[in-house]
Image (cartoon, grey):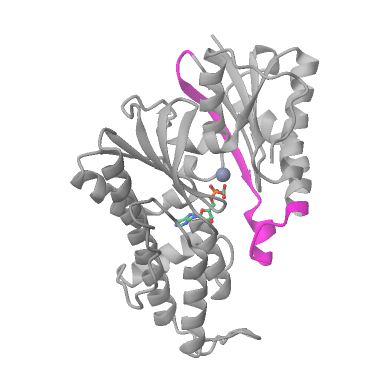
Amino acid sequence: MTLILVIETSCDETGAAVYDLEQQKILSNVLFSQIKEHEKYGGVVPEIASRSQLEKINPIITASLQEANLSIDQIDVIAVAQGPGLVGSLFVGLCFAKGIAWSYNKKIIGVNHLDGHVFSSFLKNDLTVEQNIGFPHLCLSVSGGHTSLYLVNDFGSYEVVGQTIDDAAGEAFDKIAKILGFGYPGGPVIEKLAEQANFQDYFNYPRTRPRGQDVFFSFSGLKTAVLYDLVKRGVYDLNVGPIVQNLTDELKQQVSSSLLVCIGDIFVNNVKLAFKKYPNVQSFTFVGGVACNKYLRSRLELICNKYNKKFFFAPPQFCTDNAAMIAFVGGYKTLRAEFSVLSLDVKV
Ligand code: KG4
Ligand code: ZN
């Protein structure tokens, strides 16, 4: 039996998990989210994030071992998210992992956080591993920090088909939510309001046009277009901020709904181009924090059905940052003996 203890502290979540490699089963997955500490600032404050990581790391790791009913002596390998992410937060997890590996004489593996997201759709809600995705497949990975479409050739091997040239889609949700005074993170609030407006397109915000047949994302112009549309409607002042008495619930719902439909169209248009470019792929996966969005999932599922591709998405608990997705990558790296040296460093 090979047991892997996993630490993930890339941003504003402290995560720890235990993975049983032979059984391909996550034995525990514990997460502390700092959302409450950051929401009043409208985004993550790096210094607050790293200090909170320091407070939480020990109790979260202890809780994950307890939940798996194991002691540290029974662990074989320590896997740790090495980056990209916030340098201070990453340092906490990495130093802790190195400390455990050194003092208990365990092997250590540094894991790329983005690999964790790309392969997170291999985890099922019942904590076992999905066997039907296959290679090569296409993966749309969308979070607050990235929006990329990948051709995934094997575990640990993938290439960028297209990615955002400016903001990530999650960032667009967060920034527009901030403009409207919804707080952080913006995606879940916007989804709820959009549902109340029946996912209709009221304002026809600009869709970024792919250059020729290239897969291509850009969300910075969309954010500006929404902002100036709000100014035009008399609900936002560029110097003062939202004019709350004019910002009706109906308008909030309509803006949210139009935004979501617009981002849905941008995704679908790009995925269609990718399916044409790579006709041999059989499957498509949708991962990252934004893949929590049911509307976007249903749009992507529809297009997959149309093109006869199997559709998979990471369950919501594995969409946003979590240690289980790092565990899965740590698992296939262990099988390949891709261990790190103790001098491994963060990779921001
Ligand atoms: O993967 P994640 O936890 O963090 C990064 O690595 O960035 O993703 C967070 C992002 C935020 O931008 C948040 O607004 C977005 O995921 N998000 C959503 C939803 N839930 C979270 N976006 C749209 N709809 C949602 N339901
Ligand atoms: Zn992430």
Q: Is residue 119 visible?
A: no
Point out residue 242 in the picture as x, y percentages from the top left corner. 57, 83
> Quarter of the image holding residue 239?
bottom right
Q: How far across and how far down the image is residue 285, in percent?
A: 37, 40
**Image: magenta residue range:** 22-47
Instruction: Decide: is 31 above or below 232.
Output: above
x and y percentages locating residue 23 in the rendered image: 45, 15
Is residue 222 toward the left or the right of residue 241 in the image? left
Residue 239 seen in this snapshot: yes
**66 magenta-colored:** no
Q: In which quarter of the image is ligand 2?
A: top right
- Residue at image x 74%, y 43%? 87
Q: Which residue lies furthest to the front in this view?
A: 212
Which of the 4 quarters of the picture holds residue 197? bottom left
Of residues 73 and 319, which is closer to you in this image? 319
Name which quarter of the figure residue 253 lies in.
Answer: bottom left
Q: In which quarter of the image is the C terminus?
A: top right
The front one of 208 and 123 is 208
- Which residue lies at the image location 56% right of the left edge and 67% below the top edge? 175
Q: In which quarter of the image is the N terminus?
A: top right
**Which residue is at 33% across, 39% downward?**
284
Residue found at x 51% / y 16%: 21
- Residue 268 screen position, x and y as percent: 31, 54
Image position of 33 with respect to 236: above or below: above
